[in-house]
Structures are given as structure tokens and as C-alpha cells.
Amino acid sequence: MKKVYYLIVLIAIFGLIVSGCIPVVPPSEQNELGSTVSKTTIVSEGGEEYINVITNGHKIKNKWDLKGSFKVYDGYNWDGLVPEGATWEYSIHIKEAMNGDFSVGSIRFTSGDIEVIGHVKQTKSDYHYWYEAPYDYHNPNLAASGTAEYNDETYNFQFLFSTRAMWFAISYESLEPYWTNEDVWKGSVREYQLCSVLNAGIFTLDPKNIH
């Protein structure tokens, strides 16, 4: 009797398979389901490695490798430690991620015996404060922030860069909510700052696009 029962069950299952009644996820839906699974892999691209996640937030969008010099703007002479009109050397190395919160890099400024190095923690393009400022004529810009080392002390830093000017300031003040609101520290909390003379076209806003 049991054999007959099992035979009936097998025949019923076989009938469902033939008629297509057993639910099977279509290939297209299988892919969609798979895309919701978080995966992390290391991918090599042009000698550079980045973490590839589904949002691509860590993926490198642009590489900034810039060196040069500029004269300081009057009043932005590193708290009087650098003469008005002095020359600063700069070196900028930034890996700008698709999501700016994952950007990394370094920014170095030197003038005479003064050296300050910023460690980039995040970036933003077309930072509102400078993009809307009259003296920058709505030029595209790159903003960066992070921590800075100067005279064996650690500060926070803000950096703005466009074809017209370059500005860098360090402070003990937190970056929030300034960074979120795309604003800058008030002058009273800036421990040191420098700014290049304003001159349209003095810098080249031309990163190495790795795509």
C-alpha cells in the first residue's frame, strides 16, 4: 500500500513540473536578487587598487597630482609668520572617490622654514561657499578636509582650490557643521591660513581621470 502511495505522490510532482506549477525564479530576477547582496572585492585598475562595493562609493573617480608655487594674498600670511607677498610651494596628491567621504590623499605647503601637511579624509566638488563667492566667478572647484600636522601639533584643515585661487586653513575647531553646510570656519577660529593671489587661470583644475 505504501508503494502505491509513494507512486501517486511522484506522479503528482512530475505533473507539476511538466505543467510549470513549481515556482522558479526567472534568470533576470535571480540577477536582481543577487545584486542586493553586499559584496566586497579588491580590483586592480591601472596599478591602483580600490574596494569595489555595489554602490561604487570607494571607487576612484579622479586623481589629483599637482605641484607648483604661488604668491600669498595680502592678509593671508600664516598669522604673520610669512611676509606679505611671499612664495609658497605646494604639492597636492588626492584620490577622489565616487563618494567623497572615501577620498584620501595629502596636501603639503612650504614657505621658508614653514611646512604644513594635510591628510585628506574627504572631498567635495563645487563647494557651495566658494562656488557662490563673487571673487571666484562661479568657477568649478575642489574642496578637501581632514587633519593637518604643523609644528608637531594636529589640527583640522579646510582646503579650497579652483583655477582662480587656492586657500588652506587649519584650526582646532571641529569641521561640523561647516563641511555639511559647505561653509568655512569663521576667521576667529582659524589658527593659521594662507591664500594665493587672485588671478583667473593661475591654476589648472585638470585631474587625471582614470575611467
Image: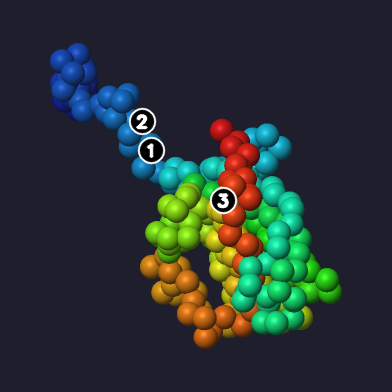
Q: Amino acid at mark 1?
A: Ser
- CA gap, disc 1 to disc 2? 6 Å
- CA gap, disc 1 to disc 3? 46 Å
The residue furthest top is: 18
Viewer can see residue 210: yes
Image mark for residue 35: 1
Question: Quick one: 148 or 27, which is closer to the camera?
Answer: 148
Q: Write down the residue under mark 3.
A: 200
Q: Amino acid at mark 2?
A: Asn
Question: Quick one: 104 or 117, which is closer to the camera?
Answer: 117
Viewer can see residue 147: no
Looking at the rendered structure, the secondary structure element under dot 3 is loop
Looking at the rendered structure, the secondary structure element under dot 1 is helix
Q: Amino acid at mark 3?
A: Ala
Q: Earlier in the sequence, mark 3 or mark 2?
A: 2
Label 3, residues with CA under 10 Å away: few <14, some 14-19, many ≥20: some
Label 2, residues with CA under 10 Å away: few <14, some 14-19, many ≥20: few
Q: Write down the residue under mark 2.
A: 31
Question: Quick one: 158 or 129, which is closer to the camera?
Answer: 129
Residue 132: x and y, percent? 40, 59
Residue 118: x and y, percent? 67, 67
Looking at the rendered structure, the secondary structure element under dot 2 is helix
**Do the CB atoms of the residues marked 1 and 3 lie less than 8 Å apart?**
no
